Amino acid sequence: MIDQLKMIVVLTLISCVAALLIAFTNAKTKDRIARQRVVVQQEALLQIMPAGVTVAENKAPLSSANDTLTYWTGVAGSDTVYAFKVATRGYSSTINYMICTTAEGVITGMAVMEQNETPGLGARVQEVLSKRLIWNGLGGPKEKTASWFSEQFKGISINQPIAIDKTAGEWHGLDEKGRRRLKDKNGITAITGSTISTRAITNGLSTRAKTYLKAIRG
Amino acid sequence: MMIGQEIKRGIIDENPILVLALGLCPSLAVSTSVQNGFGMGMAATFVLTCSNVIISLLRKVIPDKVRIPCFIVIIAMFVTIVQLVLKAYLPALDKQLGIFVPLIVVNCIILGRAEAYASRNNVFKSLIDGLVMGVGFTFALCILSVIREILGSNKLLGFKFVPGFQPMTVFILAPGGFFTIAFVMGVVRYIGNRKRGVRR
């Protein structure tokens, strides 16, 4: 009897102390975690919006449910661009990305914010190519470059079907002429071996992103 | 107790991954790049050391029948704390390690050390054991991830490694992880056997 009581008391006490300590850590880190989330968003916005715009947060009602869509406007003179988040199911995860388009649906920038695709394949939607070698790169200042995959969405229109080119090779390997040819047919290059992840993003752009832009424009 | 001997025990003689073959699942998943491997190693070392100390302190209080739930609660608490701290201060690493931080709770290295060592030895010994085992885990993860990052993505610490070399993607994926672990384990066994004078 005593033994059983002891078991219960000890386990309860340990659990209570553990809960207290976790609550304490949570209280200490809560604000910082929330701030980190905002920082990630701000960085993405900075990356996808044209330089020198005034950014403001807005909300638009979505017709499908009682949902609202949070979006950001960037105003420069008489031009306004709209940025919002899109999420689509990829190969092994939901890919969360943010795009910024003009009123006509021409993308000014795209950034993948969160994904859990296959490492070495689909996960390369976020791949940043470093030109520097390890030998001369260590210790130097950090390069700041966008991922090549999102770079190629600049100038693509979401109101027209987006072509996926699987024969030209990857975008970072193309020369000016090849890139222009892609732009002409509103196309992007697929990541080798990851057509599903690539298509998830283009599909999201031509379905969800289109609806969102319509909702924003009213 | 010789500190040097203890370190050697953690890194070589009883290396959690390469000799005891514990915790292979997270090892396989996070050893795709050196940053991930090292970060995971550090997180696990922290949890292992803290849980070893607390479990050793409470070893006379915890009744034998409920020891496993007690251990799990203590380990899970430290893991949750690590997770919150990572999210707040190292968001990039947290994003990379993702699901594998909460999974430290069921990492058999940590429960294994709690059960086999900390619940039977004094606080100081358990602290040292947690540290050396953690270092051994981190060390093994670093070896695996250096090999996998170079062969699988032609990078080291995120920098390009050899110009013009086409990386073998399979090394970033799970099968390559198995190959690498098997190979490194084999080398460690071979060297160990040679030292002990075992003839094939």
Image (cartoon, rainbow, N blue to C red):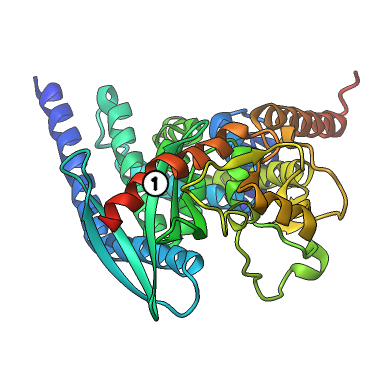
Residue drawn 39% across the image and 35% down it? B119
Task: Residue type at mark 1: give it.
Answer: Lys
- Residue on which the image places disc 1: A210
| Numbered label tally | 1
Residue A184, can we see it? yes
Q: Chain of mark 1?
A: A
Q: Nearer the viewer, residue A61 or B29?
A: A61
Residue drawn 29% across the image and 56% down it? A216
Measured as percent of width and height from the top left, residue B143 is found at 72, 45
Measured as percent of width and height from the top left, residue B146 is found at 73, 47
Residue drawn 81% across the image and 33% down it? B187
Measured as percent of width and height from the top left, residue A192 is found at 70, 37
Q: Nearer the viewer, residue A88 or A81?
A: A81
Q: Which SS class for mark 1?
A: helix
Query: For residue A117, what is the image quadrant?
Result: top right
Left or right for A168, reference A111: right
Quadrant holding the N terminus of chain A: top left
Q: Residues within 10 Å of mark 1 (few under 14, many from 20)?
A: some
Residue drawn 78% across the image and 65% down it? A132
Quadrant holding the C terminus of chain A: bottom left
Residue B1, can we see it? no
Left or right for A187, reference A208: right
Measured as percent of width and height from the top left, residue A84 is found at 37, 56
Give the vertical position of B199 relative to B91 (above or below). Answer: above
Q: Nearer the viewer, residue A117 or A85?
A: A85
Left or right for A55, reference A97: left
Q: Nearer the viewer, residue B152 or A103?
A: A103
